[in-house]
Amino acid sequence: MPFSRLRAFFRWASRNRSIRLTSEGARFVSLAVGIGVASINTGNNLLYLLFAMMLSLIIISGILSERCFKQVEVNRRLPPALFANEPATAAFVVTNRSSRYPVFSLRIMDTVDDRAVDRGVHFLHLLPRAMTIQSYPLVTAQRGLYVLEGIKLFTRFPFGLFVKAAAFPGRSEILVYPEIKALPSVLLKELSIAGQHQALSQRGQGSALHNLRLYRPGDDSRAIHWKTTARKSLLIVRETEAEDQRRVTIVLQTRILKLHGESESHERFEKAVSLTASLAVLFTAQMYEIRLMVGEQELSGEIGEAHLSRMLSLLALCRPIVEPFAGERETEQPGSHGDHLTVYVLACPDPSLSQSTHGARLVLLASEYM
């Protein structure tokens, strides 16, 4: 039984702890071995004493570094989401649980894909029962679910002879939205021309001035236009335009052609996803009601930031369906919705769709704009 416990301990230690010599530590160990050999050959008591002292320093180094790991607690704080290739701020919250001993010289890293990623987080001293927050920029180039598997601590304390590492569980997941890019002026002009027919000026609840007229019984007194009233000596009220309920349908084709290499096909698809996300951000800022179709998935038309978050989440997790070219293909197209603007975003040219604008339909090849 004691042997099985000892074996389990060594398995745990090898999985969660690692140690390597520094350059100074290598020289120190070499010197200790040399003194040990000399003491055995000569039988000099002073050399035995010096050899024992050097061995005790190595043992003390391991004990004190392990104490730092035992008494420290590290948690990770992440933003709710981030965009690809755009830095966001994350943080490590480090707490010293000991009421008596401080913590010295700790470097903290994230574990991603079984390797430590240096975030540049390092502190020299943390008092007993103290807590510190160390922020760092978090950047990733790929959209989708970004998984941080754990946290790894490194220390050279106390003598700098060894770099000791300890792995701690701390799995975190964060959704990475597609990269948002500035749309070229040519595309903005095309969108403006295609959506002109949706601009309707009519009386209603809004902010833009529609008309000035005489006051009628029952009109809201807050609508009185005081400057014109004073100039004409008549009660004049203002009528405002109804806010445009402009609508757009964005269609991202997920079926793409297999080109010379699969990597090229995926690269084109990523450009299409980025263009779709950039269009969603643009139309949201312009208060469009947006309907999004990504392959067979669909989000009904809504407006606002909450709907934008849902669209970006769908785009972050979508995947292409790569298929060889087989002549004409049937392309899913959204049903007609009156004067709605429909924007198709393609990763590769699609023979079933024209590259020109017809009425309220606009077809965009992502490689031409991204």
Image (cartoon, rainbow, N blue to C red):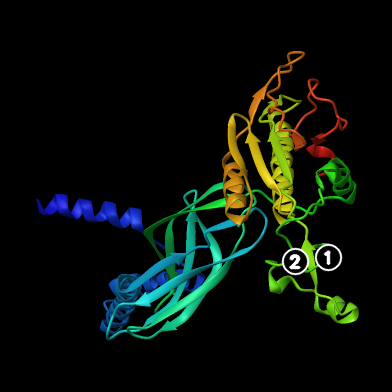
In the image, 263 versus 321, the foreground residue is 321
Q: Which residue is mark 1?
A: 213
For disc 2, the neighbor class at 10 Å (few under 14, some 14 to 19, many from 20) is: few
* Rendered location of residue 279, percent (x, y): 74, 47
Above or below for 127 versus 346: below
Say if residue 112 shows up in the picture. yes
Looking at the image, residue 45 sits to the left or right of residue 348; the answer is left
The kind of residue tagged 2 is Arg
Q: Position of residue 262 (x, y in %)?
A: 69, 29
- Along the line of sight, which residue is nearer the eye, 365 or 331? 331
Would you call the spot at circle 1 few (<14 residues within 10 Å), some (14-19), or many (20 or more)? few
Relative side of 18 to 235, left or right: left
Give coordinates of residue 190: x percent, y percent.
Answer: 88, 43
Direction front: furthest residue: 217
Whole-percent x, y for residue 173 in the image? 47, 53
- Up the image or down, 91 lies above or below 178; here it is below
Check disc 2 and report the residue beneath it: 216
Q: Residue at the top extreme?
A: 327
Residue 195 occupies which quadrant of the picture? top right
Say which of 260 and 202 sits in front: 202
Which residue is at a point 84% across and 76% down the rendered structure image?
234
